[in-house]
Structure formats: structure tokens, C-alpha cells
Image (cartoon, rainbow, N blue to C red):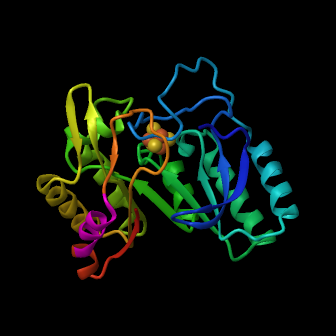
Amino acid sequence: MLFDSIVYGPIRSRRLGVSLGVNLMPTTAKLCTFDCVYCECGWNQPVSHPQLPTREQVRAALEYQLSTLDVQPDVITFSGNGEPTLHPDFLGIIQDTCALRDQYCPHAKVSVLSNSTQLGRKDVVEALLLCDNRILKLDSAIDTTMQLIDKPVNQHLTVAQIVQWLSLFEGNFTLQTCFLRGEYEGRVIDNTTPEELSAWYQIVDILHPKQVMIYVIDRATPLQTLSKVPADEMEAIAAPLREKGIDVIVSA
Ligand code: SF4
């Protein structure tokens, strides 16, 4: 499923409420630094000259929607057809969005769903710090599993590197993890084993995010062998964190 516009919705999001979406990636193709086995946009395809919207096009599309909507959104969410922080004008776009939010819907939050791969860029970190919610992905604390589930384009990317970047936010972010099971090219995918969870809890302890968001696959996935983790198991994964006082959102 691809979003065919820059601004879409508002939609009622499982995790965010009434959400006005913003897609900074092409409207005809997915563009991402991951190729997650569960991606609702499908597998990455070769894109020779990706057409990204300009900063001015994003500002104009967002202003039009915000000035004509009947319902005020709870949140303006950057997500869409790939990784939003890949946009070269991401910082300027976030600055424009915060200004439009202040003008048209001052109670709405500005949120970014990101796969964390661009956190080595200062402009991306600066932009994310302007947002109300930074929702940053880490699907496994074990390198081989992260590589298997997320299939990063940079095959040298490590969990340690992502954790180092995430620590820049000093806990002021939401850590998001998709729990799933399945099989890919003869290898078992399961980030809910005791070994996986033990490593993941340790990372949560180190990063101490202000919120943890865990969720299951919800729509069609490019890999057909995946299965949902049952809701009671998701609650059991959340329980030890809640006992420590961490705010955990479970979407199961
Ligand atoms: S990071 Fe998001 S957009 Fe990119 S492949 Fe994974 S699920 Fe899809």
C-alpha cells in the first residue's frame, strides 16, 4: 500500500489518535533505508530518480489541509512511503510544520515515525528535537535478528550504532518495536524468545525512553509467512517495563 499524496487523512491511528499524515517520500514508490519484512508499503524497488516533494509543496499541502479540515487532528504524523528523515529538507519542513501547527491547531502534536538510521545527521537530530514525539524504531537488540527483520540497506549497521544514536535523546523519545514471528529464506524470525527479550529489556534499561510502543503486524505484509504475536503475550512483554514505571503502549 502506497500513499498517493503528500498529506493524507486524517485517519484514526491505533497508536496516535486522529492523525493527519505527511508523506515526504515519492507518491509512486517506497524509499527507505530499511526493507522490513513486515513493511505495509511492500518490498523496496529500484527507484532511479526519486521525485520528492519540495519544502514549499509540503508547506502548501499542509496549510491547505489544516485550513479546510472540519476536525482538528490530535497529531500531525510524518510517516508515509518510507523513511521521512531521508528528505534533504527535513529540518526546514519540520520548522514549517511547527509554525503551521501553532497557527491552525495549537493543541496538535508533531510526531515523526522514523527507523533511526539517519540519526548520525545533525540536521535530523535537530529536527527531531523540535517535534513533540520522536517515535524511533529498534526491532531487536541482537544484530542478526535486526538484520533479518529490518534488512537495512547498509548491511554494516549495528544495534550498538543505533543505540549510540538513540542515547543522544537522553530518554526523551518513544522506542517502538514490532514483535513478530515467521520464517524468511529458511531462517526463523522470532524477536519474542527469552534471549531476544532479555537483550531488548537491557537496551530499554540503558536508553530509558520516556515511552515504549510495542505493536504487532496489522495489515498485509510483503513476507507471507509472518504471524501476529497474541495480545496476551504482548501484555506479558510489557509487564516488566510497567513494573519499573515505564509508560508502555501495546497495539495488539
Ligand atoms: S522502516 Fe518503515 S517504511 Fe522502512 S521498510 Fe521498515 S516499515 Fe517500511
* Residue at (32, 50) in percent of width and height: 139
Q: Please, is residue 141 above or below residue 98 in the view?
A: above
Judged left or right of residue 117, residue 145 is: left
* Image quarter in which the C terminus is found: bottom left
Judged left or right of residue 31, residue 53 is: right
Q: Position of residue 48 (x, y in %)?
A: 59, 17
* Image quarter in which the N terminus is found: top right
In this view of the protein, can residue 64 be seen by the observer?
A: yes
Check residue 220 for magenta coloring: no
Q: Please, is residue 232 above or below residue 196 in the view?
A: below
Q: Please, is residue 66 above or below residue 183 in the view?
A: below
Q: Position of residue 136 (x, y in %)?
A: 42, 55
Q: Position of residue 249 (x, y in %)?
A: 41, 70
* Residue at (51, 54) in percent of width and height: 113
What span is in magenta?
230-239
Q: Position of residue 236 (x, y in %)?
A: 24, 69
Q: Residue furthest left?
A: 195
Front residue (pair 55, 241): 241
The image shows a total of numbered marks equal to: 0
Judged left or right of residue 81, residue 199 is: left
